[in-house]
Image (tube, grey):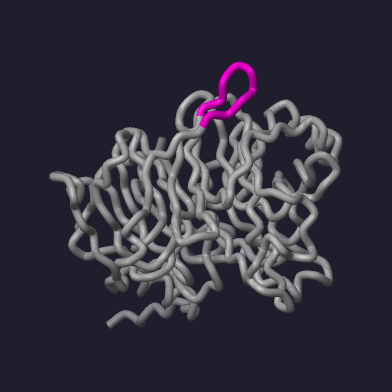
């Protein structure tokens, strides 16, 4: 009998192998309110896959494509806001690593003495910008909109408006022409020695919560100079009670979630006109959902068929273009944001409290 061949085995390799062989934990329920809603998912009766857990408030997922300038494997990057960290989940391995979850940045949104006193010092919303070849980041602790480029170079794209520091940039979306729009609510101004009344924070400099636009040309100039754009050149689109998640919705239009201080929330469609003004109209409201489910309007995305996928009471709420609720993905926990992956991955990734979840799709609906 020939001698047995013994291969070196590491704990990480065994763990990664078992994660593919053994069935993953699933949680939650898919509720169809319109015929055919659950037909877009693979095995919707199982609920959502738990890909990873143990994070302190997972948020802001973004899809990182193949051949990205950051030299990272394709996968989902996401924030752990209270950990001040960015992670990536990938099933492609690479860099002599097994598939799984890895740190990308351990000082993601804050790197000063104030970090220890902040409840949410890290990054929040993330998005990969193909034209700029970098990962745009909403950074709570630094209170800036930044970008990570090749070779881990970090540039601040914008830090203030009319001489006043931002509150805490929260979410960001890319318009078809390459411009970006981002929200600036006060949630990051939550210090351990203060109350939850963010608007009254002693650290606040801007006395309202805004929605801002930064053009592609302005961002290119900031990257070339290595310094943020002049505050006077920024464009403020709107003031809202609690602007939060945001997603592009075609040319010169976007959808935004508004989580007010009172127990009410809604999603609005906004349009930029040629004169530079923004007109917003309520698209869908939470209303009685607060009585049944936990959570408030937060992150959102528009799919390739025009549906709104919005985190809110219950988990993920899906609306058609007329604002009719088509279905729910009940996560059973506070749910922050989501992102679609393109072909061939074909999935919906969800950040829910301390978890990264996934729903497999029969075909990609990434816009």
Q: Could you say which quadrant of the image residue 238 lies in?
A: top right
Give the vertical position of 148 relative to 251 (above or below).
below
- Tell me residue 69's x, y (percent): 64, 42
Residue drawn at point x = 28 percent, y = 55 percent: 328
- Tell me residue 160's x, y (percent): 79, 45
Q: Nearer the viewer, residue 194 or 250?
A: 194
Q: In which quarter of the image is the N terminus?
A: bottom left
Looking at the rendering, the stretch of residues picked out in magenta corresponds to 271-279
Residue 278 on the magenta span? yes
Residue drawn at point x = 47 percent, y = 38 percent: 255
- Tell me residue 97's x, y (percent): 54, 64
In this picture, residue 313 sits left or right of residue 122: left
- Tell me residue 353's x, y (percent): 47, 69
Q: Could you say which quadrant of the image residue 57 lies in?
A: bottom right
Residue 15 on the magenta span? no
Q: Residue furthest left?
A: 35
Q: Residue furthest top?
A: 274
Q: Could you say which quadrant of the image residue 143 lies in?
A: bottom right
């Amino acid at each position: 009998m020939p001698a047995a061949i013994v291969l070196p085995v590491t704990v990480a390799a065994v763990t990664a192998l078992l994660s593919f062989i053994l069935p993953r934990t699933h949680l939650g329920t898919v509720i169809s309110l319109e015929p055919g809603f659950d037909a877009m998912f693979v095995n919707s009766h199982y609920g959502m896959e738990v890909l990873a857990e143990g994070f302190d408030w997972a948020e802001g997922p973004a899809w990182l494509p193949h051949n990205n300038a950051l030299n990272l494997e394709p996968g989902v990057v996401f924030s752990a806001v209270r950990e001040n960290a960015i992670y990536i989940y990938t099933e492609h391995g690479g860099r002599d690593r097994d598939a799984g979850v890895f740190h990308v940045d351990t000082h993601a949104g804050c790197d000063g003495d104030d970090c220890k006193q902040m409840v949410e010092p890290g990054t929040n919303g993330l998005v990969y910008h193909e034209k700029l070849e970098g990962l745009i980041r909403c950074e709570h602790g630094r209170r800036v909109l930044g970008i990570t480029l090749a070779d881990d170079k970090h540039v601040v794209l914008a830090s203030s408006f009319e001489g006043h520091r931002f509150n805490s940039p929260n979410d960001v979306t890319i318009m078809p022409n390459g411009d970006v729009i981002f929200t600036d609510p006060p949630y990051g101004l939550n210090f351990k020695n203060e109350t939850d009344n963010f608007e009254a924070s002693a650290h606040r400099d801007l006395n309202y919560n805004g929605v801002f636009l930064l053009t592609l040309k302005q961002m290119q100039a900031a990257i070339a100079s290595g310094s943020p754009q002049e505050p006077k050149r920024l464009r403020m689109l709107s003031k809202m009670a609690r602007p939060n998640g945001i997603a592009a919705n075609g040319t010169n239009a976007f959808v935004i979630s508004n989580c007010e201080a009172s127990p009410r929330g809604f999603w609005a469609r906004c349009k930029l006109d040629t004169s530079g003004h923004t007109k917003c109209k309520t698209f869908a409201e939470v209303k009685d959902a607060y009585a049944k489910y936990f959570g408030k309007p937060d992150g959102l995305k528009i799919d390739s068929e025009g549906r709104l996928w919005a985190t809110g009471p219950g988990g993920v709420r899906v609306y058609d273009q007329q604002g009719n609720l088509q279905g729910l993905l009940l996560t059973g926990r506070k749910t922050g944001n989501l992102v679609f992956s393109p072909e061939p991955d074909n999935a919906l990734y969800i950040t829910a409290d301390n978890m990264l979840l996934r729903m497999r799709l029969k075909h990609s609906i990434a816009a």
